[in-house]
Amino acid sequence: MSTVIVTGTDTEIGKTVTTAAVAAVALAHGRSVAVLKPAQTGIEAGEPGDVAEVRRLAGEAVTGAELARYPDPLAPATAARRAGRAPVRPREVERAARKLAESHDLVLIEGAGGLLVRLDDAGSTLADVAQLLAAPVLVVARAGLGTLNAAALTTEALRSRDLTCLGIVFGSFPRSPDLATRCNLADMPEVADAPLLGALPEGAGALPPADFRASAADWLAPALSGTWNATTFAASLHGA
């Protein structure tokens, strides 16, 4: 069994599409997969959320679970307070993840926003969840200026907590990248001190699901490292 935390250097950078791509690769290698969303913000009851999007792209074989949702597009702690609802706490996420792990090879926990966004009024974060589960963290980064600094801060925060960074994925890489973006692709592993696991093309989530699944392994086989490919990537997820 593996549990992997998926976080980002910012919001709206492709965490859900990246989670779906990882799920698709794992499913293609015969793994059973569950995706857990501790808190979904900016969404009303009855609306499809990130879990539904992962299942649409990766396949209905993915088991989905969501613990809470709040209408305001804010950090979970703030959104819960404004909605007059109980926040999601790390122990609750831990229990849900361990329950899913009893019947799945891989559990993907997709956070809201970045690693240190507050989950509750006690200041708990996704990093606390990762510590409770001793789970490695996959970091989704934005392409473009500023991403090296943001990624480095995230991986430094992981190391300070003795947490493992599984690697970094660019969640939406432009099809015609400018100079800064091309340089960031080359510089990311050294600056963030973490392996680059791939780059999903801009608009990947808009592809037909069958095309998305067929391409996921190629996106998650980084061009800069010949030692990584779809098979070793999936094996790393299984053994993380």
Image (cartoon, rainbow, N blue to C red):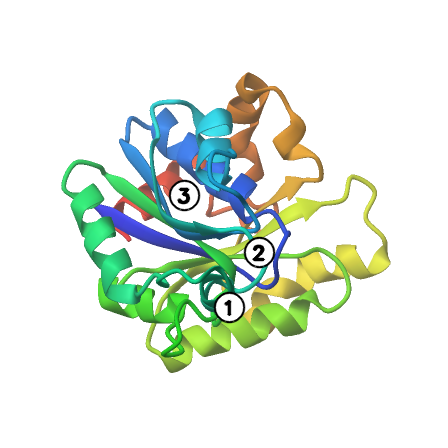
- Label disc, if present, on residue 78 of the rendered structure: 1
Q: In this figure, which residue is indicated by the disc labeled 2?
A: 72
How far apart are the alpha carbons under marks 2 and 1?
9 Å
Report the side of 87 relative to 205 (left or right): left
**Three-letter residue code for mark 3:** Phe
Q: CA distance from mark 3 to mark 2?
A: 36 Å
Q: Position of residue 135 (x, y in %)?
A: 29, 60
What kind of element bears circle 3?
helix
Q: Is residue 95 shown above or below 238?
A: below
Q: Is residue 43 above or below residue 95?
A: above
Q: Earlier in the sequence, mark 3 or mark 1?
A: 1
Q: Which element carries disc 1, helix, strand or loop?
A: helix
Q: Is residue 148 left or right of residue 39?
A: right
Which residue, given by chain and number where applicable, does mark 3 sit on?
233
Earlier in the chain: of badge 3 and badge 2, it is 2
User: Can residue 240 be seen?
Assistant: yes
Q: Amino acid at mark 2?
A: Asp
Which of labels 3 and 1 is toward the front?
1
Percent of width and height locating residue 237: 33, 46
Q: Amino acid at mark 1?
A: Thr
Quadrant for the N terminus in the image: top left
Residue at 23% over, 64% down = 91
